[in-house]
Amino acid sequence: MLNLVLFGPPGAGKGTQSQKLIDQYQLIHLSTGDLLRSEIAQGTSLGMEAKKLMDQGVLVPDDVVIGMISNKLDANKDAKGFIFDGFPRTVAQAEALDQLLASKNSAIAGMLALEVNDDELERRLLLRGKDSGRPDDANPEVIRKRIVEYNTKTAPVANFYKAQQKFYSIDGIGAIDEIFASLCLVINQL
Ligand code: ADP
């Protein structure tokens, strides 16, 4: 199985590159952001709770997102592999993911980290907010809060994969196809 973690701050291009990677490697895309937005759209109680936090730019509790990922892994037993997009976002989530995959005799092959500076991130998210309709993209204060959450809770997840020699840094600035080529170069050597 080819299991990849696509990593990077909000606006780094994880969604864009995931789409291209799925086509190239026939992987299943697991985006916790998309899963949460779908719960909100369906009006579930999980969605209603998550929405309050997401609208403020803060993370949803670990057990909620770990449960969603576990369900999706079980629902896709014959997959060639998964792209984890926006997950794990805390060290506790990374530990839980290792355990979930180990119980299925699988593991993460590598973490691919898209590197983009804060000014460019804020610019991209405000631009995206104009047509995504996402409330968390529309407000500069919420965007900055998401970047703070990322720097304090999520950035340390990189060290978790560095310690396992599974961390790969990719320049996330430039043409979409160039960035995609850099990702493929790493994946083909995993
Ligand atoms: P982005 O990467 O652009 O911030 P996402 O669509 O991945 O956007 O996530 C949007 C929001 O959903 C996050 O700000 C957070 O509140 C919540 N969220 C998504 N994934 C997780 C996760 N793994 N753990 C906790 N909260 C999450």
Image (cartoon, rainbow, N blue to C red):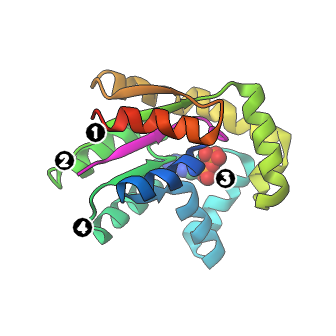
Sequence-earlier tag: 1 or 3: 3
Residue under the image location 60 percent in, 31 percent down? 172
The mark closer to the camera, 4 or 2, is: 4
Q: Quadrant of the C terminus?
A: top left
* Magenta highlight range: 1-12
Residue under the image location 58 percent in, 51 percent down? 15
* Horizontal and vertical percent position of residue 126: 82, 44
* Horizontal and vertical percent position of residue 162: 35, 22
Q: Are marks 3 and 2 in contact (CB under 8 Å)?
A: no
The mark closer to the camera, 3 or 2, is: 2
* Numbered label attached to residue 102: 2
Q: Residues within 10 Å of mark 2 (few under 14, many from 20)?
A: few
Residue 176 occupies quadrant: top right
- Mark 3 = which residue? 53
Sequence-earlier tag: 4 or 3: 3
Name the main secondary structure of what is drawn in magenta.
Answer: loop
Residue 117 occupies quadrant: top right
Q: Residues within 10 Å of mark 4 (few under 14, many from 20)?
A: few
Q: CA distance from mark 1 to mark 3?
A: 31 Å
* Numbered label attached to residue 58: none
- Mark 4 = which residue? 77
